[in-house]
Amino acid sequence: MPAAQLALDLVGSAVFALSGALAGVRARLDVFGVVVVGTVTAIGGGILRDVLLGATPPASLRHWFYLAVPTVASVVVFVWHPRVSRLGRPIVVLDAAGLGLFTVTGTRLALNHGLGPAGAVALGILTGIGGGVLRDVLLGQIPLVLRREIYALASAVGAVLVVAAHEAGALTLAWEIPAAVAVFVVRVLAARRRWSMPTPRMPER
Amino acid sequence: MPAAQLALDLVGSAVFALSGALAGVRARLDVFGVVVVGTVTAIGGGILRDVLLGATPPASLRHWFYLAVPTVASVVVFVWHPRVSRLGRPIVVLDAAGLGLFTVTGTRLALNHGLGPAGAVALGILTGIGGGVLRDVLLGQIPLVLRREIYALASAVGAVLVVAAHEAGALTLAWEIPAAVAVFVVRVLAARRRWSMPTPRMPER
Amino acid sequence: MPAAQLALDLVGSAVFALSGALAGVRARLDVFGVVVVGTVTAIGGGILRDVLLGATPPASLRHWFYLAVPTVASVVVFVWHPRVSRLGRPIVVLDAAGLGLFTVTGTRLALNHGLGPAGAVALGILTGIGGGVLRDVLLGQIPLVLRREIYALASAVGAVLVVAAHEAGALTLAWEIPAAVAVFVVRVLAARRRWSMPTPRMPER
């Protein structure tokens, strides 16, 4: 793995851990619970991806830094959470970068393992949103990503772009970067302008 | 896989997706959430089965139609849910057919992977009920199948019949069909007559 | 596996099943639900461990007694739960023994599969606490282990001791027993003296 991608990967993990640990603090977990929820948010998507692809043990258990970075980020949140939770906008921006990166990596790994377009898109999205889904399930909440906000759709855009490039025989790093950037842009715009997906019409009420 | 079984498999997926997507609509998820919960309900049991057997990537990620059918079924529910939710009885009947089919397939695959009778029954039931359990966990509810109604028991009847035929050295398609039918009959009768499993005596209240 | 460890393993499973089944009774599940939650509590940690290590099908599905023992224990709880729930202290003590045993086994298996120190500690803790986490998720509750009480910390102590012995080239059964005993002692003392982990300061309230 090139050094640049590893660095981005760890930044993405750290930011996902921040969001998970903050949610843990709000649910008044103890320090261990905050670290667990932060770490699961950071590496849960990648673990689901690796288990479904049969690439076990998952990468995040094989390399200590994938566990150390989210642990440290979660402890930072536990200690300084009033300050961290004031960082609303920077967290949304970094989280969008993590979403783009994880989606693209997951989609590419799925294609490398021989999945077709539909399976690769599904697995790419799962890699991007899986950690957040596990976070919400552990906290007894319906996953935020299923309820509102353009989050999964941003991830889907990136996964489709990667698969399209692959089908065209043109999947290289030069195509992955714009795909990750597309996720990032859609997600940041949606967050800033409060775009939402449609919810069911409820005519009877 | 014979064409007849594939067709039945996809019908089962579609019906499970209907039940999942309807639950998602009732929880007021957005369109993406409805599709995710519908699809997870349809393919979740088979994915758990394949992961536990080490048959990765799971079949439902390797063939696009296993993702496309539940996605389309979920979108149909999202758009026309008032009409779909009025189909109470047909859905129970089709769902019972899906339960029978998924249970029998899961039990047979477990036996093929070398599991013994107890493990094969457990995995057969998990294949049948796993999607519904994941649906309820994603929606923040205690899984319905653990609380009431003869649903898992119907699945258990079919799994035991398949294992018994296998132990007798007689497991062929001619035995699988009556096993699936048995699940179907038990489930439909239980739903119609509102049979329930016993719940704990609570003498202190 | 030596007979002594198998016996301990089954005792640990039985006790974990008791705690799971009691929680199921309190949530007023039916008899099937009580058996499922009891069994998942007993074997869930080991299943997560085996799936993450790629050791599929999991041991608890390959050997019938790993399913039979928790099933019987759960049925016992279903029928005699008022009496079982009065056994507060013995259950805490046996549960602590199970926690120690499962942690040490999980950590050792992770090391055998080539995981490094951080991954082995994480997997050892997951083996110890995973069943209880799944139990609480199935019952729609935030996992107890994330909220309060020295439970995961006790598990972490044992996992670190096993990894330290392994790093020193000295991991034998003679080192595993004291590691499991350390988990047991920390857990029983914490339960008796109501030690807790720190929770976040909430200065704004």
Image (cartoon, coloured by chain):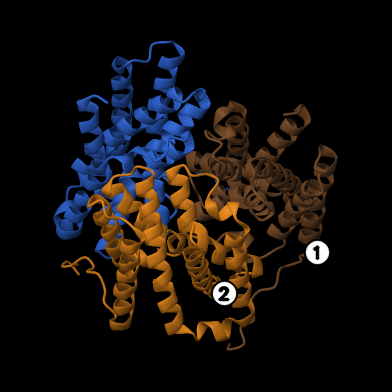
Chain colours: A blue, B brown, C orange
Q: Which mark is residue A157?
A: none
| Residue identifier under label 1 | B193
Closer-to-camera residue (B134/C96): C96
As helix, strand or loop, the secondary structure at mark 2 comes to helix
Quarter placement of the C terminus of chain C: bottom left
The residue sitting at 45% across, 33% down in the picture is A123
1 and 2 marks in contact (CB < 8 Å) = no
Task: Give the alpha-carbon distance from disc 1 to disc 2, as whole Å.
Answer: 25 Å
Query: Is residue A125 positioned above or below A89 on the image?
Result: above
The image shows residue B155 at horizontal and vertical percentages of: 72, 54
Tell me: B188 left or right of C71: right
Instruction: Give residue A158's quadrant in the image.
Output: top left
Q: For the residues carrying marks 1 and 2, which lies nearer the camera in this image?
A: 2
Tell me: B161 left or right of A174: right
Instruction: Give residue C35's quadrant in the image.
Output: bottom right
Specify the subunit that label 2 lies on: C
As helix, strand or loop, the secondary structure at mark 1 comes to helix
Residue found at the far top of this picture? A169
The residue sitting at 81% across, 58% down in the picture is B189
| Residue identifier under label 2 | C25
The image shows residue A70 at horizontal and vertical percentages of: 24, 47
Instruction: Give residue A99's quadrant in the image.
Output: top left
